[in-house]
Amino acid sequence: MTGRQLLLIRYGELGLKGKNKYKFINTLHNNMSRAVADLDETMVKNGWGRLWVETAQPQVAISRLQKVFGIYSLSPVLQVEKNIEDIAKAAYQTLITALPQGGSFKIETRRSDKTFPLTSPEISKEIASIIFSKLDDHYTADMHMPERVIWVEIRTKGAFVYGDLFQGAGGLPVGTGGKALLLLSGGIDSPVAGWHMLKRGVCLEAVHFHSFPFTGEQSKEKVITLCRLLSSWQGKSVKLHVVHFTEIQKSIHRECEEEYGITLMRRMMFRLAERLAKQRQALALVTGESVGQVASQTLESIATINNAVSIPVLRPLIGMDKADIIQIAQRIGSFETSILPYEDCCTIFLPPHPKIRPQISEAINQEQALDIKTLLAEALNKTETLNISI
Ligand code: ATP
Ligand code: MG
């Protein structure tokens, strides 16, 4: 017996992907391998229609794997020979580890190997009777509301016994959904929007618009920290493009009507992001917008801003309440960083009365005063790209 633990990995939704299934499973396999690469005596195996991890560090491995999208749940399992005595021994061991002081339990058997001589209910019954002969009266059987279910799976290659089921992150493996460019501010919403896209298997690069010296080093550091958090969910480094936005903001402030400032600024952000996305072969932009949250997120604003680009703009938070977004931000670990009080470029030159229902025609009219082409080219020229890893 080695000191290694076997983990059974369940990948739910992947099972539905028909002939793409192998590509999805291979990507998941690679992503899992990367997540546990530095752990002792750890390897990911693909076999018997499942993914498995063998590891000498099960606790760390489980917590790492819980951030790998595509995994629905995972269980530490004992693999034994397919005979009732060995299965019962493993079930006993699993039970007393899970409930050392006693309690109620139930044995639940699944038999995919139909050549095994007993039916699933018969197997459960046999095992329970062997286990009970070794237990004291602190343990009881409960078929309806047991404190623990001990699962037994009889498969062609062996029998597997487990009593714990850890939730995975769900979703699809990162890398199976192409690449998008996330507009990452230092706020609460955009990291959560990025996380949702990662969850659907989309790989991310990020762009941040920085208005030095109006926004300082600290606000850039904050975005780098958020990127690091996203990279822990992406499973590999995130490229962060920092675009120097000051000249564009000054130009808008100088040349255009104040109440259209935010709309025009955001049209320029979208244009820059679209160009970067094309350079980086990203197929869509992602923002943290949600209808009605602020003046620039009314439907009129969204339409006017969106009109500046032709690339798809994905807004995974569009119908969510702020309170729900905050809850997710707390769960995924971005909230603490997002609420640090550093200036964002959107708060610079913020007009006292931003236009809540801007018109596309008026935005285009206002932009006549700007040398858009030169402003975009200069900002893109000064863009710095950082590789942010976990
Ligand atoms: P967030 O909490 O994500 O900052 P917000 O509620 O403050 O969002 P806005 O400031 O209107 O909303 O921004 C809407 C979206 O535009 C953001 O979610 C983000 O995707 C993008 N965005 C805003 N400011 C920036 C910036 N400085 N750099 C990159 N993207 C930005
Ligand atoms: Mg913001």
Image: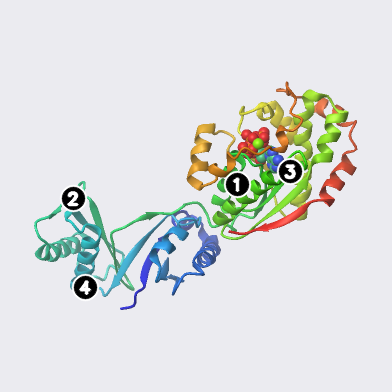
Amino acid type, residue under disc 1 in the picture: Gly
Q: Quadrant of residue 214?
A: top right
Density class for disc 3 (Cα within 10 Å; few <14, some 14-19, many ≥20) is many
Bin the neighbour count of mark 2 within 10 Å (Cα to Cα): few under 14, some 14-19, many 20 and up.
Answer: few
Specify the amino acid type for callout 4. Asp
The residue singled out by tag 1 in the image is 194
Residue 233 on image: x %, y %? 54, 54
* First in sequence: mark 4 vs mark 3: 4
Residue at mark 2: 143
Depth order, front residue of 331/297: 331
State the CA–CA distance, disc 3 to disc 1. 16 Å
Quarter containing the N terminus: bottom left
Instruction: Measure how far apart labels 2 and 1 are at the Cα level.
Output: 43 Å
Around disc 4, counting alpha carbons within 10 Å, would you say few (fewer than 14), some (14 to 19), or many (20 or more)?
Answer: some
Q: Which residue is the site of mark 4?
A: 86
Q: Amino acid at mark 2?
A: Met
271 to 173, vertically: above or below: above
| Residue of label 3 | 209
Q: Earlier in the sequence, mark 2 or mark 1?
A: 2
